Image (cartoon, helix red, strand yellow):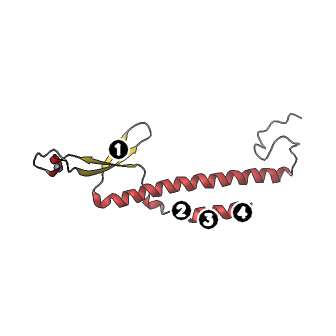
Amino acid sequence: MRRLTERRQRLLAKLPPLEEVLRGSLIERAVRCGKASCRCAAGELHDSAYLSVTHRGGGTEQISVPRELLRNVRHGIAVYLQWWEILEQVSAINRDLLRHQRATRRGGSDGDGQGAVGHKRAKRRQ
Ligand SMILES: [Zn+2]
């Protein structure tokens, strides 16, 4: 139990700054700009990048990302993924803690048939 709470603390300490979070996918493509005289017409394509964000309910938002902001955007997306990763891990630890607390509370006996939750609502059948 102590081991679990210590692991939880270590995970929380690894959380990156939430203010830098950015949801979405960075899409990078090589494109032609359309000018016949441009180097891309000869096959030397331009790098193009945009952040694609899918919204609940269906819409998708796309924001083009200039080269000098690519690093920020990659970082923001990484922060987002790290938060989710840690959220899931802490949640798994809390499930283990819940099982442990429940087992401790029952004292090894499940005679009352109620477990540790639902005290008020549980119907007594005995
Ligand atoms: Zn071009």
The x and y percentages for residue 102 are: 78, 50
Q: Earlier in the sequence, mark 1 or mark 2?
A: 2
As shown in the figure, which amino acid type bears the numbered disc 3? Arg
Dots 4, 3 in contact, CB < 8 A = no
- Establish whether ligand 1 lies closer than 8 Å to the Cβ of label 2: no
Q: Gap between marks 4 and 3, in whole Å?
A: 11 Å
Q: Earlier in the sequence, mark 2 or mark 3?
A: 3
Dot label at residue 61? 1
The x and y percentages for residue 77 are: 43, 54
Figure quadrant of the C terminus: top right
As shown in the figure, which amino acid type bears the numbered disc 4? Arg
Dot label at residue 3? 4
Dots 3, 1 in contact, CB < 8 A = no
Disc 4 versus disc 1: nearer the observer:
4
As shown in the figure, which amino acid type bears the numbered disc 1? Glu
On screen, 68 above or below 48?
Answer: below
